[in-house]
Amino acid sequence: MAEPTGKQLGRGRALASLIAAAFTLRIRRFEIADRSMEPTLGDGNWVLGAVRSGSVRPGDIVVLEMPGRPGFEIVKRVAAIGDGSLLLEGDNPAAGSVDSETFGPVPAAAVSARLVLRYRPLPPRLLR
């Protein structure tokens, strides 16, 4: 039997991470509906997020309710952290990303999920 390739091993690790996260964390599915996070996440991508996953670090991609717009969730990257607040930014400023440049820093407690896996389009890809 042939040895697994690096790509196959990567998929296996992604699946194992997903299964472990499902048992240890609450997982929620999100659909990306704009281009503000391209090239990391594109319009129509499906991702999984660990709900209330604890602390976040710069580089993490998070979900939160947009300040001043109750019920409207946005996906942004944590750019910096200070005094319990987060500075958030989109990966694609040319797409008109609304982020901390627009609404300022947000409390870390505003984060509802930290994205962990993009699973559509296939193949799955860890987001850190």
Image (tube, rainbow, N blue to C red):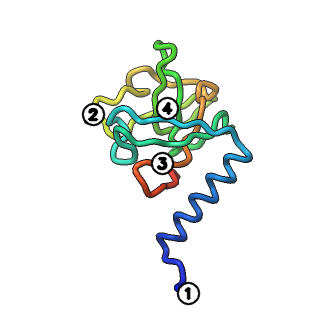
Q: Position of residue 75 (x, y in %)?
A: 46, 33
At mark 3, the secondary structure is strand
Q: Which residue is mark 1?
A: 1
Q: Which residue is mark 4?
A: 87
- The answer to whether the residue labelled 2 contacts the one labelled 4, judged by CB atoms less than 8 Å apart, is no
* In front: label 2 or label 4: 2
Q: Quadrant of residue 35?
A: top left
Viewer-proximal residue, 24 or 98? 24
* In front: label 3 or label 2: 3
Work out how far the residue at label 3 is from the one at label 2, CA to CA, in angstroms.
20 Å
Work out how far the residue at label 3 is from the one at label 4, CA to CA, in angstroms.
23 Å
Q: Is residue 87 left or right of residue 25?
A: left
Mark 4 crowdedness (10 Å alpha carbons): few <14, some 14-19, many ≥20: many
Where is 40 relative to 104, above or below? below
- The answer to whether the residue labelled 3 contacts the one labelled 2, judged by CB atoms less than 8 Å apart, is no
Which amino acid lies under the numbered mark 4 shown in the image of this protein? Leu
* In front: label 4 or label 1: 1
Work out how far the residue at label 3 is from the one at label 1, CA to CA, in angstroms.
30 Å
Q: Is residue 45 left or right of residue 12?
A: left
The answer to which of marks 1 and 2 sits earlier in the sequence is 1
Mark 3 crowdedness (10 Å alpha carbons): few <14, some 14-19, many ≥20: many
Which amino acid lies under the numbered mark 3 shown in the image of this protein? Arg
Q: Position of residue 122 (x, y in %)?
A: 42, 54
Q: Which residue is mark 3?
A: 118
At mark 4, the secondary structure is strand
- The answer to whether the residue labelled 4 contacts the one labelled 1, judged by CB atoms less than 8 Å apart, is no
Q: Quadrant of residue 50?
A: top right
Residue placed furthest toward the right: 24
Where is 10 relative to 50, above or below? below
